[in-house]
Image (cartoon, rainbow, N blue to C red):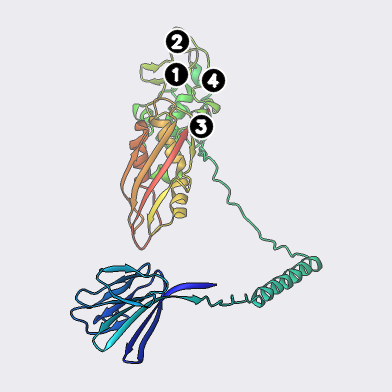
Amino acid sequence: MHARVVEVVARIADSVVDLAHVGIRGRYRIGTAPEVELPVAAGALRAFPVLDLGFVFRRPAGLPAILHAEGTSLPITDAELRLRPGWRIEIPLGRVTLSLALVERPRIAVPRRRAELRPFVYGAAVLVVHLVVWAAAMLVEPIERLAIEVEAAPRPPHVRVAHVEEPPPPPPPSKQAAATGGSAASAPEPDGGQRGPRDPKARAIASARQGGMMAALGDLSALIPKVDVRKLVNDSVFYDEEAATRGNFGNSRRFDPTKNCTDCGTVKTGRYATVSKGRGAGEDYRLPGEVAHPQPLISPCEPSDCRVTGASSLAIVRHDVDLRLGAFGYCYQRFARKQLKGLIVLDFAIAPDGHVHSARARGLDEIRDCIVDVLNVIPFPLAEAGTTVKYPLSFQPSS
């Protein structure tokens, strides 16, 4: 196979100073610029393509060019001319003569490089050997299973506060003293003549249980609980209506207040007596500090909902708050006008000395202030720096 190219020869006299073969997509430039193929000083030419794309000859302006074809020589007056086979064009450039001719040149067959297969064969062999060794190890040697003990932390249960029952009442007065109309103060006491229990609250409860026994107004006022928030947080002891009912507080007997009875289950203060509107003593009658609802179910804060930032960890904050869930339950029993159900979110800060400040709560407006009072007296461990906490609590009625 042959390829058609333009043979460009530059001579000085009979000496060849440059020889080039330019394809159909090639160029041959002359001038004084650094990128030209033949550097010559030909007028003001810097980079003039005497041979352009497609075997097109371009004559420099002001320079002669001679066409040699079929034994004749003719001057070229055209600015551009496409070369044909058998033509030869000469351009005198001072001492250098440039000759262009379209010739046929044989194509040089370059053998394709043989692909090197040895790296691929080696890699395949190594892979096969590794697979065989691995399969043999799996078949011969049994797999040893590692025994890892996983201990799942139990979810904290709903906390209910254990109630402390009242101390047992003193023995009632004898029937003989009640029949004669004598006061309990004049009757002899087993403890040496003292007037009942020394504790005012116990003395008022004893008066209520005995029904017809006189009780001073100071003793009766002891029945109204005064909320000591700090004591409530420490031991969560408060009035339990169910426990009082099991202890037969108020006697719970049917009675007719229009008849003269000495044991009607009423609390007397001088000439006046508190009388129930229901069928028995104690019905539809509430003391000011009495709880209104059973202890609720309080769901502790889940780790995904709690936000603890600072020196104290989430585990420490959860431990100290969850220990006081019974005190939060008291706020529900004491101040909720109906059985509430919902979420209350606590936002507070813990100082390095363990005291709570900037405490506030969102949700369940009826018990919110009491919840904040309880939160303000919860003691936390000492820390190197302060801690900010966002702690949601969920309240559910127990029945």
Q: Are marks 1 and 4 in contact (CB under 8 Å)?
A: no
Badge 2 or badge 4: first in the primary sequence: 4
Identify the disc placed on residue 169. 3
Mark 2 Cα shell of 10 Å, populated few (<14), some (14-19), many (≥20): few
Badge 3 or badge 4: first in the primary sequence: 3
The residue pinned by badge 2 equals 257
Identify the disc placed on residue 266. 1
Instruction: Find residue 79 and report its horizontal and vertical position in percent.
Output: 25, 69
Considering the image in quadrants, where does the N terminus appear? bottom right
Instruction: Find residue 196 and report its horizontal and vertical position in percent.
Output: 45, 33
Q: Are marks 2 and 3 in contact (CB under 8 Å)?
A: no
Residue type at mark 1? Thr
Q: Are marks 2 and 1 in contact (CB under 8 Å)?
A: yes
Alpha carbon separation for disc pair 2 and 3: 25 Å
Residue type at mark 3? Pro
Alpha carbon separation for disc pair 2 and 4: 21 Å
- The residue furthest top is 258
Residue type at mark 4? Lys
Identify the disc placed on residue 175. 4
Alpha carbon separation for disc pair 3 and 4: 17 Å
Which of the 4 image quadrants contains residue 198?
A: top left
Q: Residue at x 52, y 19 (%)?
A: 252
Label 4: which secondary element: helix
Mark 3 Cα shell of 10 Å, populated few (<14), some (14-19), many (≥20): some
Q: Nearer the viewer, residue 315 or 42?
A: 42
Compared across the picture, whether 138 is left or right of 70 comes to: right
Badge 1 or badge 4: first in the primary sequence: 4
